[in-house]
Image (cartoon, rainbow, N blue to C red):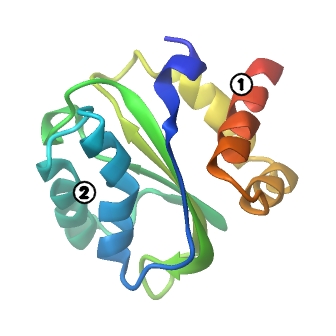
Amino acid sequence: MQFSEMLKPENVRIVQSIDTWQNAIRLACAPLEEGGYVEPCYADNIIAATEKMGPYYVLTEDVALVHGRPEDGVIKQQFAVTLLREPIKFSEDSFEVRLLVTLAAQDANSHIDAMRVLAGIFCDQDKINEIVALDTPQQVYDAFVAAASEQ
């Protein structure tokens, strides 16, 4: 599946701040729920897994790849991107996060190419800094699509 099919412009949001990490998960999952890609329980299942295992999806400074298992409520494969102007911590000792990429994966393999694109972004602090400084959801979407075309 092409990266541009896995991230729709309407699934990109920019928010000033959020009060709790639980609400950050709900906010990050909201575009996927609204678009019919995940069931309403998806965010709750990720929150429950976080309470059990810690914030397994916080990858680096600024970046979280929010995801659950396919059986946690995934209907159709898709990404959402939420940019927080004010960072949030998912635990006392976690990195501060401003860029939440939410993945709804239907199985273990079909999203691998898209994950390669994300890995290229997540490993490049300059690219992350560039993305978190963008002004509009469309600019954020365009930056992800441009990164995909560079791969």
Q: Amino acid at mark 2?
A: Ile
* Residue 47 seen in the current view: yes
Q: Give the label, 2 or 1, closer to the camera.
A: 1
Q: Is residue 96 above or below residue 19?
A: above
Residue 78 image-quadrant placement: top left
On the question of residue 60 being in view, the answer is no
Residue at mark 2: 46
Q: Amino acid at mark 1?
A: Ala
Q: Is residue 62 above or below residue 79?
A: below
Please report contact status of discs 2 and 1: CB closer than 8 Å, yes or no.
no
At a point 23% along the width and 33% down the height, the residue shown is 36
The mark nearer the N terminus, 2 or 1, is 2
Asked which secondary structure carries label 1, the reply is helix
Q: Is residue 19 above or below residue 16?
A: below
Q: Residue at x 20, y 68 (%)?
A: 52
Residue at (81% x, 60% y) in the render: 129
Q: Is residue 111 left or right of residue 42?
A: right
Tell me residue 28's x, y (percent): 40, 56
State the separation of the CA atoms marked 2 and 1. Answer: 27 Å
Other-residue count near label 2 (Cα within 10 Å), few / some / many at <14 / 14–19 / ≥20: many
Q: Work out whether residue 64 or residue 14 is closer to the camera in this orientation and state it.
A: 14
| The label number, if any, that marks residue 148 in the structure image | 1
